[in-house]
Image: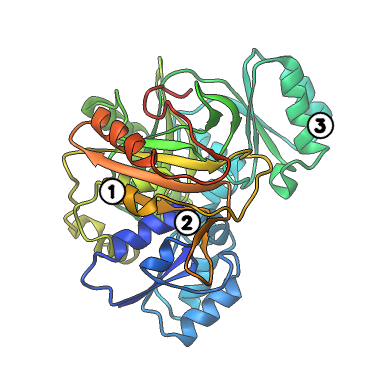
Amino acid sequence: MKVLVVGGGGREHALVWALSKSPKVNELYCAPGNGGIAQLATCVDLKATDVDGIVAWASANAMDFVVVAPDDPLALGMVDALEAAGIPAFGPRRNAAVIEASKSFSKQLMAQYHIPTAACQVFTERDAALDYVRSQPLPIVIKADGLALGKGVIIADTLAEAVEAVEDMLDGGKFGDAGRKIVIEAYMTGPEVTVLAFCDGTHLVPMPSSRDHKRALNGDQGPNTGGMGAISPAPGYTGQMAGRCMREIFLPTVAAMAAEGRPFQGVLYFGLMLTPEGPKVVEYNARFGDPECQAVLSLLDSDLLEILLACRSGTLDQVDIRWKDAASCCLVLASGGYPGAYGKGYPISGLEEAGRTATVFHAGTVQTPEGEVVTSGGRVLGVTAVAGTLEEAIDRAYQSAAGISFTNRYCRDDIGRTSPN
């Protein structure tokens, strides 16, 4: 099969890497790809959000299957457009991708179908939002309603921080259209866990749990990022807890989306908080998380293409999905300054040596005409190690990453060693 993956980050490198192992794949493409993906697939110079361009290219080049990985093209309806052109695609249609694209929609869905989550209110007017904030206990959480590259969530410890967040979003346009509507919700406490799940509209198969570390700095301090590292499985996510989440959250969500005429086919991301009152939903995403994807897919012991095809065809219950009896750690190496301003174009050394003991997924890299790999983004690499125990996987990831260098290289030194909340 001729397969195209849409996207150009670490998640897409992991997907290309996993798909390259399938005996059913004989031609693999990625748009736009990156410096690491170029070693496994033919990169296509199209933006991931160029719906018309991607559809036209996939049609002209007779793609058999397209995997739409990032949130923006899913929210823009790329899967709908591909299917309308007769090209089979993986990912939720636009009316199902709204579960991530609009936090107010997902909150209303959970309220209507009694899926546990934090209490909240939705606002579009600054004064009403500020009045509500002043009446609530601290800390409090302010979220941009739309897509904001994983950064549209502010945990305000003080009233001044909460007021600033509200004003930045509703008046200052900090997150553009994504922040013109905001969700203000109660702060929850407890360990955070991510569970990604394959869905075919009716059936759901959870993947191994994971834990992402969003904050930029050690000790879970600093601004939110797209993710500074992830481990799998998440400590404390027991079989008993997994069963409870399946009954109270996972299956009810899939059923709710189907009942709303929005059957979800793709990967549904459950961001969970294991609160003293029980598991609650922090957020939904309509795709693989990043860097959770790198950690989790490293443990897959089945043909990924077969699974993705089954999600589209509604036959997920007929696929044998196996996982390694192991643990993994994805350590993100970032450009200094991320998630703020950072430099680009710095040569990267040590990749070949690191690749002997870990899988190095590229996120923000490009390959120069001379074949040199240089930095091109905030999150540059995801050094991902697999071992028999989580502690061994964490140690191996750090040891493998130690030999990689580029100007202003930065990574946290506590991934997997703290419990983010």
Residue at the extreme bottom = 60
Q: Which residue is mark 3?
A: 126
Q: Which sits earlier in the primary sequence, circle 1 or circle 3? A: 3
Along the viewing direction, whichever of 161 and 330 lies nearer the viewer: 330
Whole-percent x and y of residue 203? 29, 52
Along the viewing direction, whichever of 91 and 165 lies nearer the viewer: 165
Helix, strand or loop for disc 1: loop
* Quadrant of the image occupied by residue 414: top left
Residue drawn 78% across the image and 23% down it: 130
Mark 3 or 2: in front is 3
Gap in angstroms between the C-alphas marked 1 and 3: 44 Å
Q: Label 1: few (<14), some or many (≥20) within 10 Å?
A: many
Q: Which residue is mark 2?
A: 261
Q: Are marks 2 and 1 in contact (CB under 8 Å)?
A: no
Along the viewing direction, whichever of 86 and 226 lies nearer the viewer: 226
Helix, strand or loop for disc 3: helix
Whole-percent x and y of residue 273? 43, 26
The amino acid type of the residue labelled 2 equals: Gly
Q: Which residue is mark 1?
A: 298
